Image (cartoon, grey):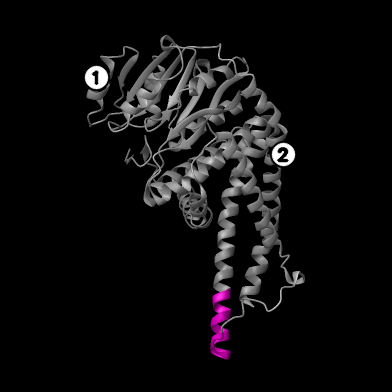
Amino acid sequence: MMFANIDRFFEIFLYPFIFLSLYFQVFMLYNFFSNKKKMKEEEDDFHPDFFPSVTFLLPGWNEGVHIKTTIESIQTLDYPKDKITIFYLDNNSSDNTKEIIEDLQSKDNRIKYIFELKQGKHNAMNAGLEHVNTELVACLDVDSTLDKRAMLVAAQYFKDDQIMALASCMQLRDVKTFWQRAQVIEYLLSVFWRKAYSSVDAMQVMPGPFSVFRKRVFEELGNYKKAHNAEDFEMTIRMQRAGYRIANAHKAYVYTVGPDTLRGLIKQRVRWIRGFLENTWDNKDMLFNKKYGNFGLFTLPFGVIFVFYVLYAVSFTVIRTLQLIYINIQNYFALGWHMPNIIPEQFDPFYITTDILFVQSIFILTILAIVFVTAKGITEDKRPFVFNFIVYLFIYPLVAPVFLFVATWKFLVKSENKWVLQDNKVVKS
């Protein structure tokens, strides 16, 4: 009786969530494929004849291991060298970063070294913005490297005066561990979703690894804020509130490094999810507000719904599992244990389950397959994905709820939020 009442309680709220989830996925698929022609035109009409000046902002803290490789990826870009300036924004490092930068400066006078004592990525970025005098500002994480044509591709979008910022196409590099393999698929799927969001002017976030802005975005809206350690998401919200257009360059590739341990992965995703929830709460007036277009009507609300839907679905699954264990224990003591007959003597399609959760699962897996194949085509990534996909499909769902539960709990109790400059590097304020 107790389990029956719990089931009814969960099912009352489960089906609306199922409907909203399916509606959102179909909506985004439709938007993507209805704009497929425009994507093709972007690729076919690519004539690199526009080279606005650009300053690369590279915030780093103790990044001696990565900084040389990252700067070299900028130096070798297929882009006029006299149009590029590089600012390394040292956020109070204590390693050999300064010595490496000085060595690079001696060979390339486009590199500037700026030291910022105040901790936090937003402070480092703002220190660099004070010295920018180029048309564009490119933000690049120090553990990321650019494809040779990345800036060339990105620049062409700014021929359109209405476009104020541009998100890139992120992929993982140096994939070595079990947890990085799962992230490969996640990043690949995000390529599709980012393009889908862009097609309806509802870009969710300007990713840290590589984003490009017109300089006047910061002149008009102000510099970065701490923003609950999600300054890139908060800046995106400010741009959406101001009605700025944000595009996505699906052929501007940037290669970044994902956390290589479960602990590092959890830290990173808790920061992302918590930053999303806290910044959304700060801007809750935008939720379901048509004044802010599809960003207010879909991006923010469905992001929040997704977080709580997953928490709800996980709780439902745990309850069902406990119920099944309880029933089996009762059956064992009443009837003894018997090997279940899991292979029917004769298959009859009449007995195929049509339970709504089963049908939804098949539908979601179908959408996942479509998105995966489409995203793989966009990125032209030739790496083998079978094992990575298996890890993502069967292991990642077991750890992803941990991110959501921890982030939501920290958001609700308003626990201490430590500043972060690069993922896996956390220091108390």
Q: Which secondary structure type mostly characterizes the magenta part of the structure?
A: helix
User: SS of the residue at dot 1?
Assistant: helix
Using the image as rendered, state which of residue 78 and residue 179 is in the foreground.
Answer: 78
User: SS of the residue at dot 2?
Assistant: helix
Residue 395 relative to residue 27: left or right: left
Residue 103's tag is: 1
CA–CA distance in space, label 2 to label 1:
51 Å
Image quarter hosting the N terminus: bottom right
Quarter of the image for residue 144 reads top left
Q: Residue at x 64, y 19 (%)?
A: 45
Q: Is residue 407 above or below residue 40?
A: below
Mark 2 sits on what residue?
30
Q: What residue span does the magenta drawing correspond to?
A: 324-338
Q: Is residue 91 above or below residue 301?
A: above
Q: Amino acid at mark 2?
A: Tyr
Image quarter hosting the C terminus: top left
In the orientation shown, which residue stands out farthest toward the top?
82
